[in-house]
Amino acid sequence: MVIEFLHTVIRWRLRRLGVQSKTVDLGNCSLHYYEYQHPAPQGTVVLVHGLGTSSSTWINVFPFFIKKFHVIALDLPGFGFSRIRNGNKFFSISEHLNTLKKFIEWKELQSYILVGHSMGGWLAAKHAACCPSHIERLLLINTAGVYYHGAEDLRQIFDIKASEDVGTLVDAMWYRYPWYFKPMRRAIRNDLLKRHVSEFVYSIETEDFLIEELYKLTMPLTLIWGMEDKLLSSETIEVVRNKVPTVELKLIEKCGHVPQLERPEAVLNILESVL
């Protein structure tokens, strides 16, 4: 209930900015998304959130994007206000990827900037590798899915059973975990269990990782990285730089896995310079 209430509060805040809350039936899911229709946009931006969260994660950067762009931020199936309709408990990586592709085709987007955080970056990079001619620019924020030795071990930290396990997870994600979130650990645990996050993580196969796809990222690519990320290894950076030599790297000091929430002012400065 607590997490749902926070999503509702953020939806209310976005509506006050002129952002519309919409839902589309894609057959195997009811997909919720936020959309801001700029009267004279400089382009379209599509935002894809990470695992265990929702489009609410973009609340601090929405005001920047809506000044110039047509903005779309979707809730992946099973997260936020989106609902899975095919009888499964969760979507696999390939099902999430197909949903993203189907949604973008339904919106008839021909050219757009794609922004993804963590698992959203994973999906964004996979999608961009399949449709490079449609992506004006790809921005990945502490992206997951880049394969390095030991990446499989991440599954263990998402094996949430008790509130203490949530503490381990969030401590790995934040440089300084907000004190006002600590009383919410039980609510976070319940939400992660409800959304079957652990089962999803254990369903990931080696072929799901970003390996050969990185060579196909020929569009302008910016990798934004919170340097104190204790969830994902900084080996991610080296792998991306080796396979995409033209990548533009933007490092944020004193910041963990969720820069758009922990250091939004730094992310906004980067977006201003890049876009």
Image (cartoon, rainbow, N blue to C red):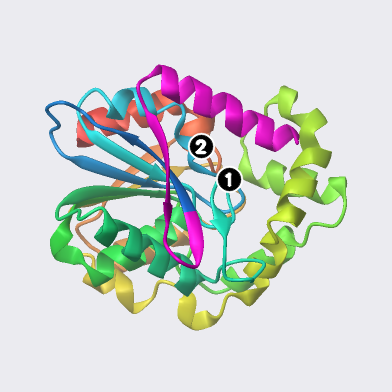
**Left of 67 or right of it: where is 54?**
right
Secondary structure under tag 2 reads helix
Q: Residue 173, image x and y in percent? A: 62, 44
Q: Quadrant of the N terminus?
A: top right
| Residue 180, visible in the rendered structure | yes
Q: Residue 243, image x and y in percent? A: 29, 69
For badge 1, the amino acid type reads Thr
**Left of 77 or right of it: where is 163?**
right
Secondary structure under tag 1 reads loop
Chain part drawn in magenta: 1-30
Q: 228 above or below 177?
A: below
Q: 69 above or below 117?
A: above
Contact between labelled residues 2 and 1, with CB atoms less than 8 Å apart: yes
Q: Residue 258, image x and y in percent? A: 53, 40
Q: 228 above or below 159?
A: above
Q: Nearer the viewer, residue 175 or 184?
A: 184
Q: Residue 171, image x and y in percent? A: 71, 42
Which numbered disc covers residue 53? 1
Please check the rendered image and state whether residue 14 is part of the magenta-colored stretch, yes or no.
yes
**Residue at horizontal 50 percent and vertical 61 percent from the top:** 29
**Left of 66 or right of it: where is 209?**
right
| Residue 254, visible in the rendered structure | no
The quadrant holding residue 246 is bottom left
Residue highlighted by disc 2: 57
For badge 2, the amino acid type reads Thr
Which numbered disc covers residue 18? none
**Residue at horizontal 68 percent and vertical 56 percent from the top:** 195
Q: Nearer the viewer, residue 241 or 263?
A: 263
User: Could you give the CA–CA distance between mark 1 and mark 2, rounded to whole angstroms?
Assistant: 7 Å
The quadrant holding residue 200 is bottom right
Q: 212 above or below 263?
A: below
